[in-house]
Image: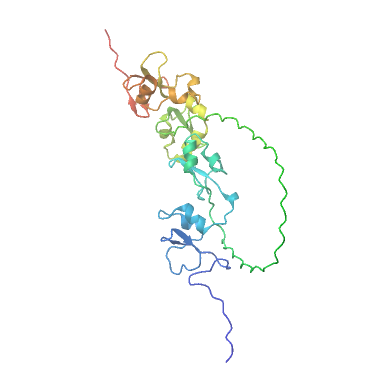
Amino acid sequence: KPTKKPTNSTPQGGSTPGGGGAVVYYPDLNLGVCKFDGAHGTNPYQFPTAASCCTNQWMDYTKCMAYADPYHDPAEIKFYPDIYAGFCKSDGGHKGLDERMVFGSAELCCDNVWMVYGDCLNKSVGGTPPSGSNPTPPTAPSPAVPTPAAPRPATPRPTPVPTPATPRPTTPPKTPKPTKRIIDPSKLTGKFYPDFDAGLCLADGKEFGQAYTFDTLDKCCTNALMNYQDCVTYSLEVYTEEDLTAVLCVWHPDPTVFATCTYSSLYPNSWTKPEKRDNYLFDTHEDCCVGAFGGPGCSQKYNCDGANAGPTPTGYITEPPTTYY
């Protein structure tokens, strides 16, 4: 009988790693990873990249990517901030974002005015770029069988000459960073007006003559002509951390009236320094009373942007009635 010619075959459903066809990733929920061994068959969940397969609510993304895409290129890692989650992500979702919102490291991404720097770094996972190619697992070489050799005579070791230890340079202490505040656009008060060409809102004191003015950043960015998220992000980018502290109305002890906390921006600039800010500037009236005077229930005043009443982070303050004698 004639000898049958060998035929090439691949597992049912697609090509195997290392083959010429496109790689198909499919999830294995029991192991919590995505596989790419060509055994996906008629599995209804099939993906062209490891990142798209690993992005779901049932599997840990970092663990899944470590298995499905272990040979990624670190140069492709890009971070972008998620201000609602409070940390930076590197899951490939930065595509389509403005280049000013994409960074090459978690440190650069977390150094912004709307997230707490330390918490952001702790929560930001190590970079894992989306897979764009077929990661072929390396084949381990067969271990060589050692050939017994004739024993060599023992050579006496030379006596080591002691060398003096090189003193290590002393690292100067780092200047403490101020506690970064998470800015809620609905509680960021001022005189905001929209710049439709730039896609953001400004509060630079030039609102006179503008057709639209608003008392919070949230209201200013909520319109049909601008993207809300881009407006909030770019508006906060306009100011440095020091600028925001200087123009923001916050609760602080009144320098002229004892046992009184005032909601205003009329406080000494020295109180914004890193070593003093947490002792003099507060988010709520009660925190100000406890921090500055040792207990709750102190008097309160409102003097934000020249108004005697208005919104605060914890509620609306009304003007006290005038008493005539």
Task: Please tell me which residue lies in front, 151 or 43.
Answer: 151
Between 58 and 49, the residue placed more toward the observer is: 58
Taking depth in this image into account, of 218 and 14 the one nearest to the observer is: 14
Residue 195: % across, % down = 50, 33
In the shown orientation, is residue 102 left or right of residue 221? right
The residue at the point 72 percent across, 53 percent down is: 156
Q: Report the residue that reaches farthest toward the bottom.
A: 1
Tell me if residue 292 can be seen: yes
Q: Residue at x 47, y 43 (%)?
A: 123
The image shows residue 193, relative to residue 78, as above or below, that is: above
Location of the C terminus by quadrant is: top left
Q: Residue furthest left?
A: 325
Residue 182: where, in percent of width, then height?
44, 34
Give residue 154's position: percent from left, percent from top: 71, 58
From this view, report whether residue 229 is shown above or below residue 64.
above
- Nearer to me, 15 or 151: 151
Q: Is residue 231 above or below residue 151?
A: above
Quadrant in the picture for the N terminus: bottom right
Depicted 11 relative to depicted 172: above or below: below
